[in-house]
Image: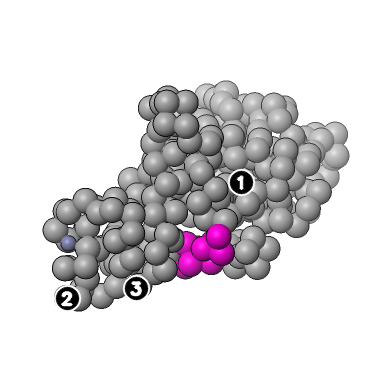
Amino acid sequence: MALHKDEAIVLFKRSYGESDKIIRLFTLTSGKVAAIAKGANKSQKRFANTLEPFNRINVEYFEKYGRGMVRIENADIIKTNSGIETSLKKACTAGFFVEFVDRLTKERERHEDLFNVLAEILEDIRGAEFTYDDILHYQLRMLGILGFMPNFHACVYCGQTMTAEKKIFFSRERGGVLCHKCAPSLPHQVCAEGVIEGIASVQQANDNKMQGSQAACGCAEKGPAYLNNGFEKAAQDIMEGFMTYHLDVEFKSYRILKGLIV
Ligand SMILES: [Zn+2]
């Protein structure tokens, strides 16, 4: 049995039998890994609060334990989750992004970019409660990394680029905005003017950040506060419909978070 060393974020934990814990880790180099921590329930000293959800840790594990699980041998903290438990909103926000990663990645699929974004999110949540803009910003970044980015810029049917005020039709099925010519013949929802452009502006700020040109365009780090005009609910509905349809997942944690963010 080879001993592996990796960095990981703890996604979930649960007790297993009298003395063990089962942990789901999101590791830097091997993606999602199911692990057992022998004796973690019995002795407080063994893994003293290291294997708590949202912690970022250094971990050493043996590959084969059975049922596809690894056995955690050692773990030590890089960043604790302290600060996240101080509010229900922070805990729910962290819970949502952890569930996002957990549900949308496969076991042992390496996702270094996603790991870094999740680490950044948890670090940010420690510092401050997220607004809906913050949540949307990271949600779009994660969708982009996973290859599920909706199109808020050009008509998803005919490809025509559209001005901000014309972006009012959204097709959940086709995953993007529709122009006024294509919309009548396709299922769509009608949004108030500014909602789709608001999401697009957060997405654009992400793109600029990726290209390191945010200073040039003058965008704030997480996009202009475009959605602070009562559009959060509408933007949230668009994103939720899109994700439920294309990813076939409903996030349990999001149901609670929804009630806290808007
Ligand atoms: Zn069109």
Q: Which mark is residue 11?
A: 1
Secondary structure at numbered mark 3: strand
Q: Which of marks 1 and 3 is in front?
A: 3
Q: Which mark is residue 185?
A: 2
Stretch in magenta:
229-237
Residue 228: x and y in percent read 57, 56
Residue at figure coordinates x 56%, y 64% from the top left = 230
Q: Residue at 29% x, 72% y: name it.
A: 188
Q: Residue 36, percent across and down?
A: 64, 43
Question: Three-letter amino acid code at disc 2?
Answer: Ser
Left or right: 74 with respect to 240?
Answer: right
Sequence order check: which comes first, mark 1 or mark 3? 1
Is residue 35 visible to the viewer in this orientation of the structure?
no
**Mark 3, residues whose alpha carbon is within 10 Å: few (<14), some, or many (≥20)?**
some
**Magenta highlight on residue 158:** no
How far separated are the C-alphas under marks 1 and 3? 35 Å
